[in-house]
């Protein structure tokens, strides 16, 4: 006995009073000459199981796929029950007519959407007629690009505070770069235009000694 998980079968049209409500797929098994599918018809008066057979030779590349079996059995059983026929689980067999009807209903029609555009005719100039002269326009003067003013640099000896490295002292600021010696992380070089710090003191009021410690200058800078 083999079982597989398939998509739910479509719901049949509304039945007449007292007839079946839905058809459920259960499983299938292979025999030497056919593949037998088991389905259940559920109605208001209870449920009945049916077996529908399809010849093994009908399955394979270019013919029926494994998932086509439950679908075609469902269609056959729906027709049998809808017509009021009484069938035992061993007599419903899919014949050549059922297979042809199923293939016709499930064959995709290929749509050809190729389209070749018609080339537009190339305009020709009659012989002997003068061509229109080309109009030349004077070149407009190009405005000079304004040079960007040099960004102000930090002065040495300023106490600053960085959002990541904490407090430090500026030790140099030239060539677009500023060096800050931090209390905890030592010296780090920044691009001056991108350096974001809070200035805590005037220039030349702090210094870094030989041991790398930041301290107030012993000799205060002269006031201007």
Image (cartoon, rainbow, N blue to C red):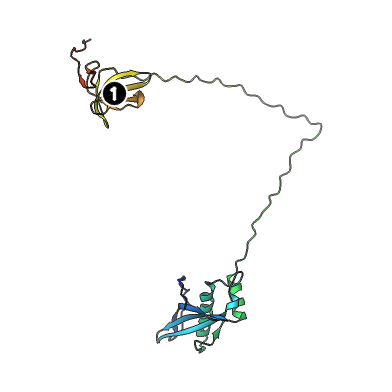
Between residue 4 and residue 150, name the one nearer to us: 4
Residue 203: % across, % down: 25, 16
Q: Which residue appears farthest toward the front when viewing the image? A: 211
Q: Which residue is mark 1?
A: 180
Q: Where on the picture, by quarter, is residue 180?
A: top left
Local crowd size for mark 1, using a 10 Å CA cut-off: few (<14), some (14–19), many (≥20): many
Q: Is residue 40 visible?
A: yes
Residue at 44 percent across and 85 percent down: it is 48
Residue at 28 percent across and 17 percent down: it is 156
Judge from the rendering whether residue 175 lies leftward or rightward of residue 111; answer left or right: left
Between residue 77 and residue 54, name the one nearer to us: 54
Q: Is residue 70 above or below residue 110?
A: below
Instruction: Point out the image quarter for the C terminus.
Output: top left
Judge from the rendering whether residue 190 lies leftward or rightward of residue 106; answer left or right: left
Residue 93: % across, % down: 56, 84
Residue 165: % across, % down: 26, 30
Q: Which residue appears farthest toward the right when viewing the image? A: 128
Q: Where on the picture, by quarter, is residue 120?
A: top right
Residue at 47 percent across and 80 percent down: it is 39
Residue 101: % across, % down: 60, 76
Local secondary structure at mark 1: strand
Judge from the rendering whether residue 57 lies leftward or rightward of residue 12; answer left or right: right
């Amino acid at each position: 006995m083999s079982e597989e998980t398939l998509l739910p079968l479509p719901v049949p049209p509304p039945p007449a009073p007292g007839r079946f409500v839905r058809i459920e797929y259960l499983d299938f098994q292979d025999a030497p000459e056919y593949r037998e599918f088991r389905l259940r018809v559920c109605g208001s008066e209870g449920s009945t199981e049916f077996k529908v057979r399809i010849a093994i030779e009908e399955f394979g590349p270019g013919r029926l796929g494994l998932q086509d079996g439950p679908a075609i059995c469902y269609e056959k059983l729906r027709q049998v029950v809808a017509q009021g026929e009484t069938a035992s689980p061993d007599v419903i067999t899919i014949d050549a007519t059922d297979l042809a009807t199923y293939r016709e209903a499930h064959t995709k029609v290929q749509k050809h959407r190729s389209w070749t555009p018609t080339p537009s005719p190339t305009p020709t100039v009659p012989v002997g007629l003068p061509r229109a002269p080309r109009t030349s326009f004077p070149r407009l003067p190009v405005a000079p690009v304004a040079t960007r003013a040099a960004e102000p640099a930090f002065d040495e000896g300023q106490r600053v505070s960085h959002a990541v490295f904490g407090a430090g002292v500026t030790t140099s600021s030239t060539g677009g770069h500023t060096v800050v010696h931090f209390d905890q992380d030592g010296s780090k070089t920044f691009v001056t235009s991108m350096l974001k710090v809070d200035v805590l003191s005037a220039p030349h009021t702090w210094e870094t000694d030989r041991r790398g410690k930041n301290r107030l200058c012993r000799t205060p800078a002269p006031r201007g």
